[in-house]
Image (cartoon, helix red, strand yellow):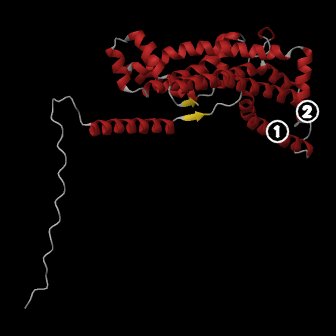
Amino acid sequence: MASTETDEPAAPAAPAAPAAPAAGNGEEPAAAGTDATTDAGDLAGLEAGLDALESRVVARQPWLRAAAAKALPPVIAIAIVLGLWQLAYHFALKPHYLLPSPLDVFGSLKQKWLEGTLLSFVWTSVSRGALGFVTSVAIGTVLGLIVARVKAVRAAIGPILSGLQSLPSVAWVPAAIIWFGLSDATIYAVVLLGAVPSIANGLVAGVDQISPLYLRAGRTIGATGLTGVRHVLLPAALPGYIAGLKQGWAFSWRSLMAAELIVNAPDLGTGLGQLLEQGRELQDMSWVLAAILLILIVGIGIELLIFAPIERRVLRSRGLLVKS
């Protein structure tokens, strides 16, 4: 039986690749060098892209537009609150002597301004708060560094610091009055006891988040002792430290108001806490709400004018907030 298979001619062989130039003739393979350069460029581009994705980019805008964009949300929020407040006053959810209108509260503020006493009330409290906070920063920073770096001290007083931070600062007022009487020392003692634990715990948390590589690198270049603290430890722990400072200021301001509410004497001067207590004694709700409003404005102003710019600067220095 005849076979149905047929023989097909073999495919022509592929032409041989040209031989590479011999070594030592002063020439290098151009293709290999080009590929290596391309790979390096692609890798650099990939790293730059990842960095850009992880960074928050703030587009640079004209200052007027930027200011309007920042001011518009809080203005809208304030308008909503005032509108709801006015509606509650209009429909008499509470008697008018218990819930005055926004205009009544602003009238009380205007009266204090015309009397020339408003700024003195604010300055008395702000100066006390600033002095107490600066002292708290000095004490809390040293204490936080000792607790963070000395294991025996941390085991001994670390839990006590956390407990003191959760203790309401108003609880210290009766003890401080017994210790120091009705004096400025009582007010500053309450402020220190409220703020120091928060600052120390914030610094401890920041130190705990430092990579051991940074500390080893600092020791390698001779940054030990106070030099290491100044140039390695504190800069590396700065985000946690600033968070502790912000919380410390909040505790300091709250502690100050609690102390001023209770510690009231003619020779102490009148701060915002004493102003609030005077309104309560006179049963003047417009006065009381005006004092509360001033306390709130000062607290927000300190946050926006001091701590927010510092925090933005730290974030930019670490590549977490980028201007474009």
Q: Give the residue number, with chain letter if any, for mark 1.
A: 79
Per the image, label 2 sits on a secondary structure element best described as helix
- Name the amino acid type tagged 2: Leu
Per the image, label 1 sits on a secondary structure element best described as helix
Q: Quadrant of residue 95?
A: top right
Q: Is residue 120 left or right of residue 184?
A: right
The residue at 36%/17% (across/down) is 218
Graded by Cα atoms within 10 Å as few (under 14), some (14 to 19) or many (20 or more), the crowding at tag 2 reads few
- In the rendered structure, which disc, 1 or 2, sits on the residue that comes first in sequence? 1
Depth order, front residue of 147/319: 319
Number of residue marks:
2
Depth order, front residue of 301/162: 301
- Name the amino acid type tagged 1: Ala
As measured in the structure, the alpha-carbon distance from the residue carrying label 1 to the one carrying label 2 is 13 Å
Q: Above or below — where is 66 with respect to 185? A: below
Q: Is residue 16 left or right of residue 93?
A: left
Q: Is residue 75 left or right of residue 146?
A: right
Q: Give the residue number, with chain letter if any, for mark 2.
A: 103
The residue at 76%/13% (across/down) is 124
Residue 136 is tagged as: none
Of the 4 image quadrants, the one containing the C terminus is top right
Q: Quadrant of residue 88?
A: top right
